[in-house]
Amino acid sequence: MKQALIFQGGWQGHEPEDVAHILAGLLEKEDYQVKITDTLQTLAEDDLTQYDLIVPNWTQGTIEQEQLQPLLKAVEQGTGLAGLHGGMGDSFRMEVDYQFMVGGQWVAHPGNDGVEYDVHIVDADHPLTEGMKNFKVVSEQYYMHVDPAVHVHATTRFPVAEGPYQTNGEVDMPVVWTKKWGKGKVYYCGLGHVAEIVNMPEVLQLMRNGFIWASR
């Protein structure tokens, strides 16, 4: 049985506890044994290399080096890392090493919550997105600063909402990407502002596939 760790907390607007339980349910259906923790001290106290997969679900906040360094090293040694939205893509804003591992960082969501936008599947032959079709989301549309080394599997097109960024013209922004960190696989999905969005069938499928891919 594979082992997974979900650490949840930080800004409560992303409903981290509810989202953590949804993600744990996905993993348990795939026969993972899941530990959920609400303290970052678990990263310092547990042997993180025992986990096949670690799921960050902690928006903003701060992390001590004694907690961050074991996480970076575990992924480098082969533990998978997979998560979504601000719980992985807007964690620990001052920690550039964490952002380097993740492959990107949230910087804006023009129009805030309630924007209707399209998610385009661009890598339909990959196991992460095989058989999936483009779909619409009504939520936050994440504008990210992204590592050029990532492999992009789905995108969304900006601009949709008004803002000063519009003068740059249209741009396709990654929504789902993967990358490597040493021996570890890293998976990120920008969707999932609140539990209701995480529970969308398309998001559940993307996360299920991402968890399996990262921990294989």
Image (cartoon, helix red, strand yellow):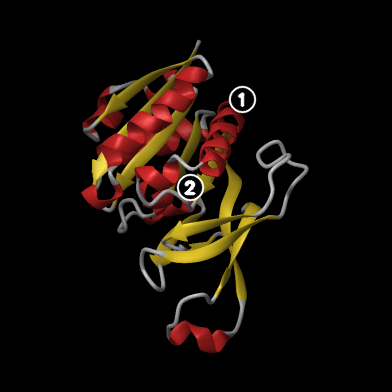
Q: Secondary structure at mark 1?
A: loop
Q: Amino acid at mark 2?
A: Met
Q: Residues within 10 Å of mark 1 (few under 14, many from 20)?
A: some
Question: Measured from the top left, where is residue 14 in percent x and y?
Answer: 30, 49
Q: What residue do we see at 56% from left, 85% from top?
A: 168
Whether residue 183 is visible, yes or no, is no
Q: Nearer the viewer, residue 16 or 196?
A: 196
Q: Residue at x 49, y 38 (%)?
A: 82
| Precedes in sequence: disc 2 or disc 1 | 2
> Which of the labelled discs sits on residue 44, or is there none?
none
* Above or below, comparing residue 207 to residue 5 in the picture: below
* Total numbered labels placed on residues in the image: 2
What residue is drawn where x is 30% and y is 44%? 58
Left or right of 136 in this view: 190: left
Viewer-side label of 2, 1: 1
Name the residue tied to disc 1.
216
Q: Which residue is depicted at the point 47% across and 53% down?
A: 100
Kind of element beneath mark 2: helix
Could you tell me the amino acid type at mark 1? Arg
Is 214 drawn above or below residue 105 in the view shown? Answer: above
Tell me where residue 212 appears, x and y as whole percent.
Answer: 58, 28
Q: Do residues under tags 2 and 1 come within 8 Å of each other at their CB atoms? A: no
Q: Position of residue 129 (x, y in %)?
A: 68, 42
Q: Residue tagged by mark 2? A: 101
Q: Position of residue 106 (x, y in %)?
A: 41, 61
Q: Residue furthest bottom?
A: 167
